[in-house]
Amino acid sequence: MKHSERRPFPWHILFFLLPGLAIYLVFSVYPLLDTLRMSFYGDAADGGHAFVGLRNFITLLTDSTWSDAFWNALKNNFEFFFIHMLLQNPIGLLLAVLLSLPKLRLRNTYRTLIFMPTMLSVVIIGFIWQLILSPIWGIAENFMYGIGLGNHFDSWLGKEGTALITLGLISVWQFVGIPMMLIYASLLNIPDEIVDASVVDGANPLQTFFYVKLPLILPTIAMVSILTFVANFNAFELIYAVKGALAGPNFSTDIMGTLFYRTFFGFQLQQGSPTMGAAVATLMFLIILAGVMVFLLVVQRRINRFQL
């Protein structure tokens, strides 16, 4: 029996993979590892950096000079995330269901119009909505008076109790197209035979959705949820564009991204500290990692069991 000839090593695959891998290592992996390393160092007397272990994290979590700002930013970040979870994803699911209706006319037009804000810059969106909601030159007040709701108009971006919620709603308006498109694509992938079988068995449209379609798109909904979590804890541009680095009023819109910016680069009277900024970035990374791990170990397992 002849020995089978060995296939030559596919060097051409490396030729195509190495450039992309090199870019990923240089611009993603190396900055992440260097940030983790820097978080264990502090400012030395000679102007350099000295190894301090976990002191930066202990200071950030316990010292009132740093901890008050950190816990406030973390609380606001979770609030910002829950606004998206409670509004953006359910609205995206509802829009995807409506777009998947076979008798809906102009669905492509609706889909394009809803997704269009997602393609715009976050900075532009923040600037436009800041103009719209301005009590001085914005059009929102006159519009609300025109429909009989003028007495309910307020300076929502200028008050501590409503600024973060308003920014969350602006973000929901801009990015609702992402969950809509992902769930819409998942609904289109459901075989027609399964839906037809439920209709033959006597199920009405609501029963078909809740007992047939919804279980089949649960993995997509779970993926949308974890993407929302990661995106919200990486959020920065909208808050910075509308409220600046101080995330006012009185830090009521401060999130982890703006806290990291002020800590690392400094702002006004606050002197920047790369090592403390690296500690903030490391905690952001650990929070995101913990959320992803909880999703994989708890939510994803239950979804798989439910599907089986």
Image: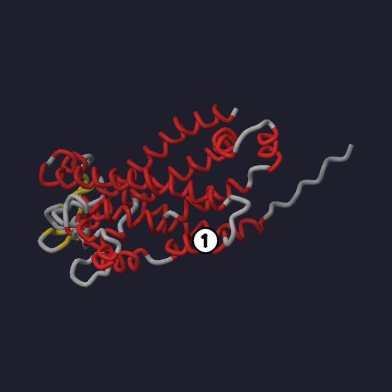
In-image side of 4 versus 223 (left or right): right
Q: Quadrant of residue 244?
A: bottom left
To which residue does mark 1 refer? 110
Question: Where the C terminus falls, by quadrant?
Answer: top right
Question: Where the N terminus falls, by quadrant?
Answer: top right
Residue extending farthest to the front is 148
Mark 1, Cα crowd under 10 Å, few <14 / some 14-19 / many 20+, is few
Q: Position of residue 131 (x, y in %)?
A: 26, 69
In-image side of 132 versus 214 (left or right): left
Task: Please tell me whether residue 301 is drawn above or below residue 125 in the rendered image.
Answer: above
Numbered circles on residues, count: 1
The color scheme shown is: secondary structure
Choose between 253 and 99: the one closer to the eye: 99
Callout 1: SS:
helix
Q: Position of residue 201 (x, y in %)?
A: 68, 31
Choose between 45 and 170: the one closer to the eye: 170
Q: Position of residue 210 (x, y in %)?
A: 54, 35
Choose between 141 and 29: the one closer to the eye: 141
Q: Look at 38% across and 44% down and name the residue there.
A: 85
Q: Position of residue 2 (x, y in %)?
A: 87, 40
Q: Residue flagged by tag 1: what amino acid is it?
A: Tyr
Q: Look at 23% across and 61% down and name the residue there.
A: 150
Residue extending farthest to the bottom is 137
Choose between 117 and 199: the one closer to the eye: 199
In-image side of 184 versus 172 (left or right): right
